[in-house]
Image: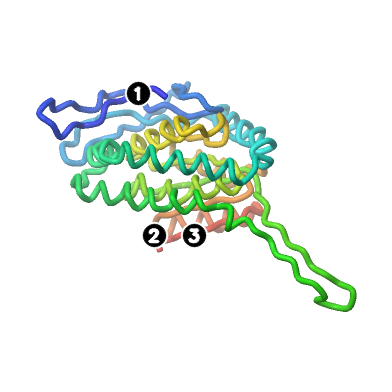
């Protein structure tokens, strides 16, 4: 994938992120939203607007969900060893681009460079874990649990999953979510914080470069309206969230009321 923005440089060239419209990642393509509503992305250290994030339209949300659902039909059949190899390539690319990602993250969050590097590295550790997914996909068999009764269990992917992530760890928390879900055979829609979407978009670019098939990951942007689509659409089977207690409570109640599996880390706990 083409790097659509330039990270801030800590060298004497003193490059800066070019202020652009943040794209969506739909059906394996980085595309500009057709929305008329945009949210400023600022550098907290300078208050400078460095990009604009779109409020994804209903049609674009529908396209993300439909693309993820269609891709699930084939991705779930991919052998677990092949899925693990995607994660192996991905963790290698993340390590190769570690400092670059941290520079982007530092500029849009206001973190120090060292703090930003820690954010990225904690996410990489989860991708390493995802590369070991084969051992986590093993079922169980038990003979003679009752007279002439044996039991068998299988671990199977759910379908389309969604992740809603906060502003304070824009690399680590998305990497908690989509690599594990996708390694297990699910497809995934990521809705990162509208305050710092540049880092998650770079993660998506590198995921594509690692060989992830088009459609296994979608990235949308926006606020409550877009989140409500993810919480209510019947095609989405599970939702993961990290953030504040009030929002976490809302996501848990709304998602479970719509018969979804929800893990909601309210208060980021």
Q: Secondary structure at mark 3?
A: helix
Q: Which mark identifies residue 4? A: 1
Q: Secondary structure at mark 1?
A: loop
Q: Mark 3 = which residue?
A: 249
In this view, which residue lies farthest toward the bottom?
Answer: 147
**To which quarter of the image does residue 107 belong?**
top left
Q: Who is closer to the viewer here, 63 or 149?
A: 149
- Packing grade of label 1 (10 A; few <14, some 14-19, many >=20) is some
- Packing grade of label 3 (10 A; few <14, some 14-19, many >=20) is some
| Residue drawn where x is 27% and y is 36% of the image | 100
Query: Closer to us: mark 1 or mark 3?
Result: 1
Q: Secondary structure at mark 2?
A: loop
**How is colour applied across the structure in the image?**
rainbow
Q: Position of residue 254 (x, y in %)?
A: 57, 53
> Looking at the image, do the residues carrying marks 1 and 3 touch, with CB atoms under 8 Å apart?
no
Q: Is residue 144 above or below residue 153?
A: below
Q: Mark 2 = which residue?
A: 268
Query: Closer to us: mark 3 or mark 2?
Result: 2
Q: Is residue 205 above or below residue 176?
A: above
Q: Which mark identifies residue 27? A: none
**To which quarter of the image does residue 40 belong?**
top left
Nearest to N terminus: mark 2 or mark 1: 1
Query: Closer to us: mark 2 or mark 1?
Result: 1
Q: Is residue 65 above or below residue 170?
A: above
Q: How many marks?
A: 3
Nearest to N terminus: mark 3 or mark 2: 3
How far is the residue under mark 1 from the one under mark 3? Answer: 36 Å
């Amino acid at each position: 994938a083409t790097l659509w923005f330039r990270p801030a440089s800590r060298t004497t060239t003193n490059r800066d992120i070019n202020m652009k419209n943040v794209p969506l990642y739909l059906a394996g393509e980085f595309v500009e939203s057709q929305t008329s509503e945009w949210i400023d992305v600022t550098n907290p250290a300078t208050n400078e607007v460095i990009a604009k994030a779109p409020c994804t339209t209903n049609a674009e949300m529908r396209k993300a969900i439909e693309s993820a659902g269609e891709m699930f039909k084939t991705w779930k059949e991919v052998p677990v060893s092949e899925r693990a190899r995607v994660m192996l390539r991905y963790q290698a690319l993340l390590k190769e681009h570690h400092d670059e990602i941290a520079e982007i993250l530092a500029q849009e969050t206001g973190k120090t460079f060292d703090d930003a590097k820690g954010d990225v590295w904690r996410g990489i550790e989860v991708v390493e874990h995802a590369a070991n997914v084969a051992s986590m996909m093993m079922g169980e068999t038990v003979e003679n649990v009752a007279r002439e009764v044996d039991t068998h269990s299988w671990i199977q992917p759910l379908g389309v999953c969604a992740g809603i992530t906060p502003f304070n760890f824009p690399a680590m928390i998305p990497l908690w979510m989509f690599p594990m879900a996708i390694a297990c055979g699910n497809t995934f829609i990521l809705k990162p914080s509208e305050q710092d979407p540049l880092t998650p978009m770079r993660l998506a670019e590198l995921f594509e470069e690692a060989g992830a098939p088009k459609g296994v990951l979608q990235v949308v942007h926006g606020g409550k309206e877009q989140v409500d689509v993810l919480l209510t659409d019947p095609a989405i089977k599970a939702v993961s969230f990290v953030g504040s207690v009030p929002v976490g409570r809302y996501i848990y109640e709304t998602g479970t009321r719509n018969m979804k599996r929800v893990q909601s880390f309210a208060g980021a706990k």
